[in-house]
Image (spheres, rainbow, N blue to C red):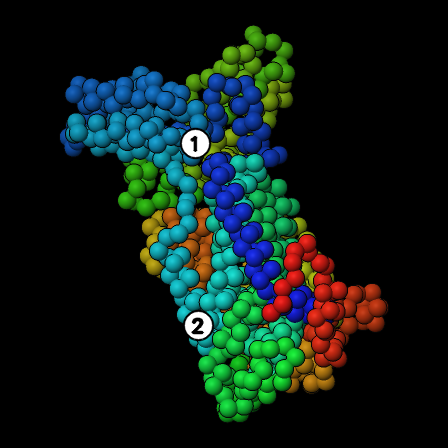
Amino acid sequence: MATFLYRIGRWAFRRRRLVGGLWLGVLVLAVVAAAMAPEGKEEDLSMPGTESQKAFDLLDERFPQSNSQGAEARLVFRAPDGQRVTARENKAAVEDALGSLDGGDQVASTTDPYKTGAVSEDGTIAYSTITYTADAVALAEPTKSALEDAASQARDAGLTVEIGGSALDSEEEPGGTTEIIGVAVAAVVLVLALGSLVAAGLSLLTAFVGVAIAFGLVSALAVPLGLTSTVAILALMLGLAVGIDYALFITSRFRDERAQGSEPEEAAGRAVGTAGSAVVFAGATVFIALVGLGVVGIPELTKMGMGGAGAVALAVLVALTLVPALFGFFGRRVLSRAVRKAPSYSRSGSERPGSERPHPVSTAAGRPGLGTRWARFVLRRPAAVLLIAGLGLGAVALPALSLELGLPGDESKSVETTQRRAYDLLSEGFGPGFNGPLTVVVDMSASSGSGDTRATTDLVAKTVRGVDGVASVGDPVLSRGKDTAVLTAVPQTAPNSGETEDLVHAIRGAVSGVEADTGADILVTGTTAMNIDISEAMSDALIPYLTVVIGLAVLLLMVVFRSVLVPIKAALGFLLSVGAAFGVLVAVFQWGWAADLVGIEQTGPVMSLMPILIIGIVFGLAMDYEVFLLTRMREAYVHGASPGEAIVNGFRHSGRVVAAAAIIMISVFAGFIGMSSPTIQTMGVGLAAAVAFDAFVVRMAIAPAVLALLGHRAWWLPRILNRVLPNVDIEGEKLSRHVPASAAELDAAVPRLPVGRHRH
């Protein structure tokens, strides 16, 4: 592996114009494809195989004239203080507003609150339900404007009017202020870590190239593959974070090789052969973790995993080829100012292959760096460091025991939004459960005949009304074929409450007896039931997912480090960091701690997708730091250093860079907290916290403490595994005996491309 990547690095350095031109061409093609592609649409979250999804599919089949998961709006009217919404002038204002929507484009139906009884008991609040023929994001702007104009018309008449439902939902777009701040912080950290504007700019440039290509491909494939804006944002988030980090690690190693006296081309080859090997395996762990999200069975989660995995794969390819090519373009400007001005740095021939080798620059003089001092401190007190760090993470993880899962609705939005104000008005006028109605679907196609339809639906309605926690049950609506009936049951409790979840199970249990007696198939669905089913599916899939992903990653790390205990330690450390991240999510999103700092106005359950999504992403990123930090330790150990010296060597060479990479990744993730999407906001908090815990507590404190306590045993590998496992030489042991290849050998090692030959 190291030797092959070494040749790739030298070839990319020599053929920098070709490599740069190829990546530029790919970038242009991706941008053009994205610009020409039709705009994708958001898709409703689905969970094939669940009862609620089966019911939605049945409704689409039996009620083809309507879209069971189409856009819906609720115009909520409130009379002025001391008046009733049924008063003549208020009633006229409501009817005029609704009349302006009748027959509008994409409008399927509009209900009259005075005919349907949609007026609160005190007569102060009424609502109308407007259904549409298209999904929320497919609604045309004139359609949304007509809805808002109707609300404004009623407001002009003195009524308070708010708009609830999904009709005003909009697609989340990246590029806000907080994301820019995150990138700016990353740029500052790069400059401080590398001591060179050119080196920092190189890392940012290559990351942006990879992200732009990934974002362009996701946009171009949005319609044929059904990719949503969340997939694009996740690809942007991950691609930017790992792209900067991977470029940073290879650039740092290149500068180390140059400081040790290697010529530029040789340094580029060695940087890609060693740090590039770590990048490949770190990227592979992230890729495995993200692709593994497909085992859950949620199409949207699978697409998010594939989109993120594609962005990571692009970041790896860019780091291995474009980064060394840019070394050739920028030359000695990649080095820090201190190295360039050092008396021992020989400018003569430093940029020309075959000329005099530059003298190595001493890096040992002066006081040891912070990483070295910290490693020696841990070696002196490994048990104390392990105990304090472990107990600290355990304490932060304690809130995770109270984790509640759900999917956010209008109740989680800001009180400044009309959707949230409509939610509050409906709760006030009709009860908290009114915002989360349940849909009971009765399939009588297998029953004995249409004569039993009335008796069956009456029995179902009676049974559902008898379940504790049901506030009301509406009249049944029959399909054209009279073989399917739909009833609406309103719970007494809020949609995201535990009582409502228990109610859904209670209704399903109660109607099972009716199914046995009548032969009908009775399904409970609706947004609330779907959310409950998805949350339960997430919990059920968690253990299988962890088993698959961690098992594959442990095997991969076993191949990388030729050790049994190091991969196990890495996996256990990950569980600590992700547990602490879940503790932060519960404290912030459920308990409201520091909620104002991240713009959360309403606490509630953590999004049901978040635990498994964060586990997948963080596990891969955690292994990044494990690979980068321990590769230098393993490299020193196989070259004869003692276990303690190997730990110090790893921190001396990689500690500062790993810390900088972690700060960069935290900054990028935190930059997405300011977005209005609850999915992205929760993901930003969870990922930023998890990376902070994993990089600075698990990898910087717990990992060296455990290695110090294990000593030589840390690098033990049974003989049978030593024979079976392939030796990928990630630490570059073969490169230490490798004679620099000639240009002809490099051309023979790397496949020729049908282009002209360039010499530089």
User: Mark 1 falls on what kind of element?
Assistant: helix
Q: Is residue 552 left or right of residue 530?
A: right
What x and y, as percent, mark residue 459?
52, 18
In the image shown, does 212 or 41 lie closer to the viewer?
A: 212
Residue sitting farthest toward the top: 451
**Image location of residue 264, percent across then percent down:** 60, 76
Task: Give the residue at mark 1.
Answer: 138
Q: Residue at x 42, y 35 (%)?
A: 137
Amino acid at circle 2: Leu
Q: Position of residue 738 (x, y in %)?
A: 74, 77
On the question of residue 262 being in view, the answer is yes
Image quarter in which the C terminus is found? bottom right
Q: Amino acid at mark 1?
A: Ala
Quarter of the image with the N terminus in it: bottom right
Mark 1 Cα-neighbour bin, 10 Å: few <14, some 14–19, many ≥20: some
Q: Which residue is mark 2?
A: 197
**Measured along the vertical axis of the image, is residue 147 above or below residue 367?**
above
Q: Is 80 placed above or below 563 here?
A: above
* Residue pictured at 60% horizontal, 22% vertical: 521
| CA distance for labels 2 and 1 | 45 Å
Counting residues from the start of the chain, the first of labels 2 and 1 encountered is 1
Write the residue at 63% across / 82% down.
355
Q: Which residue is pictured at 52% across the width and 42% down the height? A: 33
Q: Residues within 10 Å of mark 2 (few under 14, many from 20)?
A: some
Q: Give left or right: position of 592 versus 308.
A: left
Relative depth, front residue between 116 and 120? 116
Give the number of the mark in front: 2 or 1.
Answer: 2
